[in-house]
Amino acid sequence: MSFFDGLPASPPPPEPPDETLELSPYAPAGDEEFAPSQWFVPARLAQVAEAGAGPDVRILLTGWEVWPRSVTMRLSVFLRRIRPGGRSSPYGRPGGGSLRCGLLLADGRKVTTLDGPPWPAAGPSGPAFRLRGGTGGAFHHELELHLSQLPPAGATRLVVEWPEEQVPETVTVFDAGPLRAAAGEALEIWPPRRWMEIPDGSPLPGRGTWGVPGAETTAAPARVSRGSSEN
């Protein structure tokens, strides 16, 4: 006789809901507060530049994901020492001594990761710049910072500071023009005609030749020039 004999039987698992979920068509209205990753594969632009440094920290800009109406910046944070209490994590309390990032756009507007949400009664506001995701841990973090609008073309300044890690305010200058140009290369997965059956495998409308066996996309990716740092 087993020790576990006589135990009450587990209840059967619940039945799955009798409901089919369907993705709605992409219908942009205003800013892209979140990356529209359910509808698009972004254009990816490589750019490697040191965006900040402290005695035990290096912060590198490593590239961009460009969506039709917004951009996602990628930062890599490398640590040499981890202090007691997790003080070295970049996911700190906004406004404290944690990692701070901001952009000075070519038209003079300023956005930072410390900005609060806009007042609904204030009418249309400028873009939002938010830390939207991250991976890694211990000595290396990959951060995703999302700008809810495409930046205007021209010289743009990325400003980084991390007081807790003795990273001084550091400016990296780049041209946002190639980012705007690359927005047209974001690949729409479900364009309007895709909502209807296309059984013969004919080319999809829109950019490139996605979905056609053996076909190649002819559009060349835009290039972003390497940023330079100004202390």
Image (cartoon, helix red, strand yellow):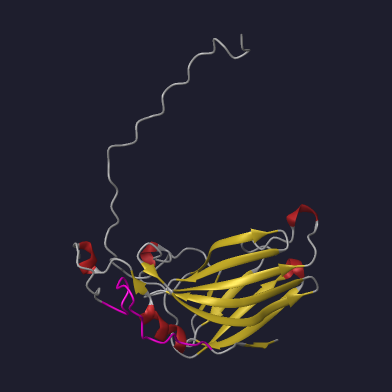
Which residue occupies the foreground of this view, 57 or 215?
215
Q: Main secondary structure of the magenta part?
A: loop
Residue 48 place in picture, x, y as percent: 61, 81
Tell me: residue 105, above or below residue 93.
Answer: below
Q: Which image quarter: residue 15?
A: top left
User: What is the span of residues highlighted in magenta in the rendered image?
Assistant: 206-224
Residue furthest front as drawn: 214
Quarter of the image with the N terminus in it: top right
Tell me: residue 86, above or below residue 125.
Answer: above
- Asked whether the viewer can see residue 114, the reply is no
Query: In the displayed structure, does residue 11 sit left or right of residue 88?
Result: left
Which residue occupies the foreground of this view, 83 or 20?
20
Q: Which image quarter: residue 58?
A: bottom right
- Asked whether the viewer can see residue 127, the reply is yes
Which residue occupies the foreground of this view, 171 or 56?
56
Quarter of the image with the C terminus in it: bottom right
Which residue is found at the position 36% from the left and 73% from the top? 187
Which residue occupies the foreground of this view, 23 or 102?
23
Residue 151 within the segment the image draws in magenta = no
Q: Which image quarter: residue 57?
A: bottom right
Residue 214 within the segment the image draws in magenta = yes
Query: In the displayed structure, does residue 40 sit left or right of residue 202?
Result: right
